[in-house]
Image (cartoon, helix red, strand yellow):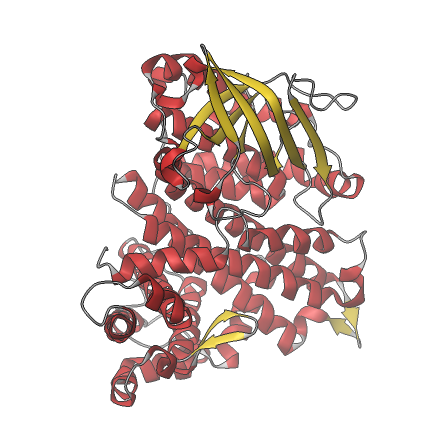
Amino acid sequence: MGWGSCRQNTDQSLMTLLLPDLLALTAAATATADRLVASSRQAVLSLVAPGGKLDADLLEQHQYAAHGLAWVSTYARALSEMRAWAGRLDETGRLGELEALILQVAFGEYLAQLEGGVPLSQVEIIRPADLGIAAEDVATFKTEPVRTLIAAGTAAPARLRIAELIRDGGGFGNEALDDETLEMVRDQFRRFGAEAVEPHAHDWHLKDELIPIEIVEQMAELGVFGLTIPEEYGGLGMGKLAMCVVTEELSRAYIGVGSLGTRSEIAAELIRLGGTEAQKQHYLPKIASGEILPTAVFTEPNVGSDLGSLKTRAVLDGDTYVVTGNKTWITHASRSDLMTLLARTDAKQGDYKGLSMFLAEKPRGTEAEPFPAPGMTGGEIKVLGYRGMKEYELGFDGFTVPAANLLGGVEGQGFKQLMATFESARVQTAARAVGVAQNALEIGLGYARDRVQFGKALVNFPRVAGKLAWMAVETMVARQLTYFAAREKDSDRRCDIEAGMAKLLAARVAWANADNALQIHGGNGYALEYKISRVLCDARILNIFEGAAEIQAQVIARGLLAGRN
């Protein structure tokens, strides 16, 4: 029997740590957190939609409160998914001591923050009063289950016990995939990452060189690039949850390798959802096999997330489009064969309505000649981390694309086509973040076990152990929230809110884990020779690309305020 029903075999010391009826308590607390979200939503609505209709100017004016609503809702959803995770484990007798403690500590900490203040960033805390929540509503939140969970879940002994369990090789908690195929996939890619990637990743980073093409070819053989492409187009036809499992394991070894599949995922999704049948037949099998390596060419200088302001032009001249303009932050641009290129085809339309998407082929670059295509130039952007594919600025002056390569064959659909891929891209980015968070945790734990100071290993000092325990807890929280978003996507339900929540939280967890793991290393963590210095740089980008944290919060807030669920 699980922790929710029978505890006879538990020793007395553990009884003092683990709450009796933990599953019942967390179920009650989840309902209370949901009521707090409902109160928060109503309070923010009164600020940004006083007449019943969302006012864009008021939404910007009260952005702090709106984004606070996004974070509060993300916490509540994360707790709900942790409770569901534990319930699945308990039903099959797999809710062990470690998993139960992770659940208890996750609830204790997040409930305490919901009451006292949720961090939007290192310098921004959102408190109930900032959302316009009345004092009596806050008092109502402090139900007996919530008070009990906060007291037990934030207590130092619970965290120290988690640290003890993971230190002694007890793993980091059952992921509850509940699918033998997915478990086999996870194990296969965990081995690949451990054997072919992880031992070499830091050297690739220090030398600032591309991931060897042999690794790319091995990934193609393993099916990474065709994972979610339908079988009729040469792919494996698996779902987004499988994509998350693969992405997490690859990113756990090195974020660059975990991100190689992102470009193929975006390109394949664009073509699958928006392409003509001829475009699907031609490109999807080649993407799936790795014969074609795509790159996404969307962002422009001085534009960033405001894609409706793009200025790169594509003018039809006979049966060819001539492209003129500049792009920036283009990942893996030199070695790619296909650009999903967003450009303006209607100069009269100054917003997103005039944008079109192109499947722009180009020769694969070499080290000597990175951009051999006529009408196209490029230069590398040197970066702190995320180096294995390299970043580039691109210039187009007379670059041509056949009219047949207009995605879907109709102009003006580019922005809509791109928006259709954002859910999958953000779910995958959340999975990348979980992988980086797990890697940082393991590196920090390994160092804390091995490093001896004042006559004992660092892991035996309470504050070090407490850091490691919370890292393990929050990594599981981010993982389960990401799995939830993936399952929603696999169910063909709109999940922009859920994908945004997963990406928002997982990116913060990755950065926090990397920062804390470096802190555990002390001065050594600042040395380039130590892997954690790379992981810190790699983790930082996750809060920026595929929509910065502020953009994610805006997407979530707008969806919640509009009444979507």
Asked if one can make out residue 443 in the rendered structure from this viewpoint, the answer is yes
User: Depth check: 484 or 545 in front?
Assistant: 545
Q: Which residue is at 59% across, 20% downward? A: 399
The image shows residue 346 at horizontal and vertical percentages of 41, 30
Residue 376 lies left or right of residue 100; in this view the side is right
* In the image, residue 521 above or below residue 112: above
- Residue 176: x and y in percent read 37, 50
| Viewer-side residue, 394 vs 438 | 394
Look at the image and tell me in which quarter the C terminus lies: bottom left
> Seen in the image, is 196 located left or right of residue 264?
right
Residue at (28% x, 68% y) in the render: 4
Instruction: Name the residue at 35% across, 31% down.
Output: 413
Whether 52 is drawn above or below 496: the answer is: below
Horizontal placement of 290 versus 204: left or right? left
- Rendering quarter of residue 191: top right
Q: Is residue 16 visible?
A: no
Does residue 250 sit above or below 560 in this rendering?
A: above
Q: What x and y, as percent, mark residue 53?
A: 21, 63
Residue 212, image quadrant: top right
Tell me the quarter of the image containing the N terminus: bottom left
**How many numbered marks have been drawn onto this rendered protein structure?**
0
Q: Residue furthest front?
A: 348
Percent across and percent down for residue 425 are: 44, 41
The front one of 434 and 368 is 368
Residue at 71 percent of width and 51 percent of height: 534
Q: Quadrant of residue 31?
A: bottom left
